[in-house]
Image (cartoon, rainbow, N blue to C red):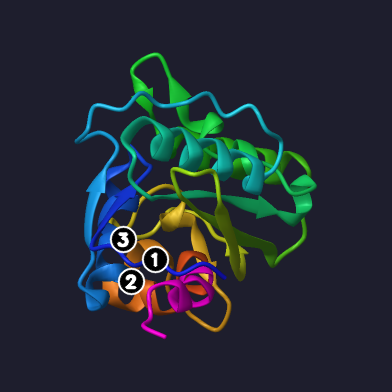
Amino acid sequence: MRRFTGKKLLIATHNAGKLEEMSELLAPFGITCVGAAELNLPEPEETESTFIGNARIKAHAAAKATGLPALADDSGIEVDALDGAPGVYTADWSFTPQGRDFVQAMTRTWTELEAASAPYPRTARFRSTLVLAWPDGHDEVFEGKVEGQCVWPMRGSMGHGYDPMFQPEGYAITFGEMSHEEKNRISHRADAFAKLIPCFEAE
């Protein structure tokens, strides 16, 4: 595994929630994070059908454009009764002409579960794939997940994306009802980050 030896890391996302979450997870290592939006980087087209493929597109595009090592995340929710949908297309379900609307996406998800008469619990998982890419084309890949279930109505205003309808296994509250600190201990991204951490630790 190649180690990251710098102090500044580009987070290849235009999602403010993801940037904040990643910055908090990397703060203990003294790493300064900068987001793609701050550097006016375009959002590359995500043309792959897997989380790894799309994370690689984002990380390598950002590293090549800036000359900085770049960390990209591609993540989504897989709902078992919907054959794993929306999965890699999680963000696509939120698209509207005015921007992303995750209330719309969550409503569609629940509507499809109802239409399928899906049994309870309506199990699902969040997946996160992190790709750390260097300007020379090298990358390291780390995958994480958290199991849980979809609940309705939506609960909580914390977090982002599908958090208000996802209740992690072993908890009575949704990600949307959890503090950032609590979510960051158990989330899919935290699981992937735990595998990434050796990249930032001194030998």
Local crowd size for mark 3, using a 10 Å CA cut-off: few (<14), some (14–19), many (≥20): some
Above or below, 34 relative to 37: below
Q: Is residue 108 left or right of residue 78?
A: left
Q: Considering depth in this image, is 153 or 54 the residue closer to the camera?
A: 54
Task: Mark 1 and mark 2 in contact? Answer it, CB < 8 Å.
Answer: no
Give the residue type at disc 3.
Glu
> Residue at horizontal 55%, vertical 51%?
138
Q: Earlier in the sequence, mark 1 or mark 2?
A: 1
Residue 39, image quadrant: top left
> Residue at horizontal 73%, vertical 39%?
115
Give the residue type at disc 1.
Phe
Above or below, 132 relative to 97: below
- The residue wearing badge 1 is 4
Quadrant of the drawing holding the N terminus: bottom right
- CA gap between label 1 and label 3 equals 19 Å
- CA gap between label 1 and label 2 equals 31 Å
Above or below, 185 relative to 133: below
Residue 6 rendering spot, x and y as whole percentages: 28, 62
Please report the bounds of the magenta region as a residue range. Answer: 192-203
Quadrant of the drawing holding the C terminus: bottom left
Residue 196 rendering spot, x and y as whole percentages: 49, 70
Give the residue type at disc 2.
Met
- The residue wearing badge 2 is 178
- The residue wearing badge 3 is 21
Residue 81 rendering spot, x and y as whole percentages: 77, 52
